[in-house]
Amino acid sequence: MFNLDHKIPPPVVGLACAALAWWLAGLAPSLALHVRGPLALVLALALAAVGLVIELWGLWTFRRHHTTPNPLTPERARTVVQSGPYRYTRNPMYLGVALQLLAWCGYLGNPLSLLALAVFVFYITRFQILPEERALAQRFGEPYLHYLRSVRRWL
């Protein structure tokens, strides 16, 4: 298998997984929970908004520390950011996308669509987060390794 590390931008992976969720929901309509309606829409939009806020908070925190938010070039990072949302999760931007996918799956109302969320978490962990962690550990050494031991990868 060819190396996918840092090859596909995470937002593209998120959109592909959203499409996968939609396809999976249509694959087995008999599994649908039939919870659509105004309340389902409001709850999905609220969860998606929380995900967006977490993403933007992470991006803003990176900008404030003058380090690259580009997930395809972790070797260009200038510092180990440990403030803002990075006190609680090492990957708030990916967590935000995952919450938006969860909101979408909830709105679709079909448990089968949750497989797309699992695909997103697996793919991002394997092909984005783990390579990022290796690159940052090599670049920053013990301060980053301490951060890895102190803060969870997702939540």
Image (cartoon, rainbow, N blue to C red):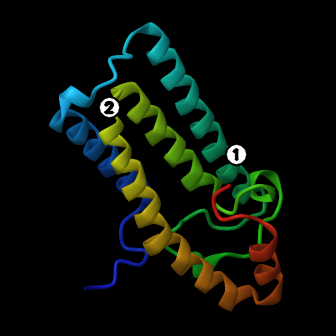
Q: Which mark is residue 83?
A: none
The answer, for residue 42, to whether it is visible in the render is yes
At a point 77% along the width and 80% down the height, the residue shown is 144
Q: Nearer the viewer, residue 105 or 70?
A: 105
Q: In the rendering, at what x and y percent does residue 133 appear?
A: 61, 79
At a point 70% along the width and 67% down the height, the residue shown is 67
Q: Which residue is mark 1?
A: 57
Q: Nearer the viewer, residue 98 or 67?
A: 98
The amino acid type found where label 2 is placed reads Asn
Neighbours of disc 1 within 10 Å: few (<14), some (14-19), many (20+):
some
Above/below status of 3 relative to 62: below
Q: For numbered disc 1, what is the local secondary structure?
A: helix
Q: Are marks 1 and 2 in contact (CB under 8 Å)?
A: no
The amino acid type found where label 1 is placed reads Trp
Q: In the rendering, at what x and y percent does residue 90 appear?
A: 69, 63
Considering every residue shown, the one lying at the far top of the view is 38
Above/below status of 129 relative to 29: below
Q: For numbered disc 2, what is the local secondary structure?
A: loop
Q: Which residue is mark 2?
A: 110
Considering every residue shown, the one lying at the far front of the view is 30
Q: Splitting the image into 4 quarters, where does residue 138 fall? A: bottom right
Q: In the rendering, at what x and y percent does residue 98 appear?
A: 50, 47
Q: CA distance from mark 1 to mark 2?
A: 30 Å
Q: Is residue 155 left or right of residue 104?
A: right
Quarter of the rendering occupied by the C terminus: bottom right
At a point 71% along the width and 64% down the height, the residue shown is 152
Q: Nearer the viewer, residue 76 or 20?
A: 20
Quarter of the rendering occupied by the N terminus: bottom left
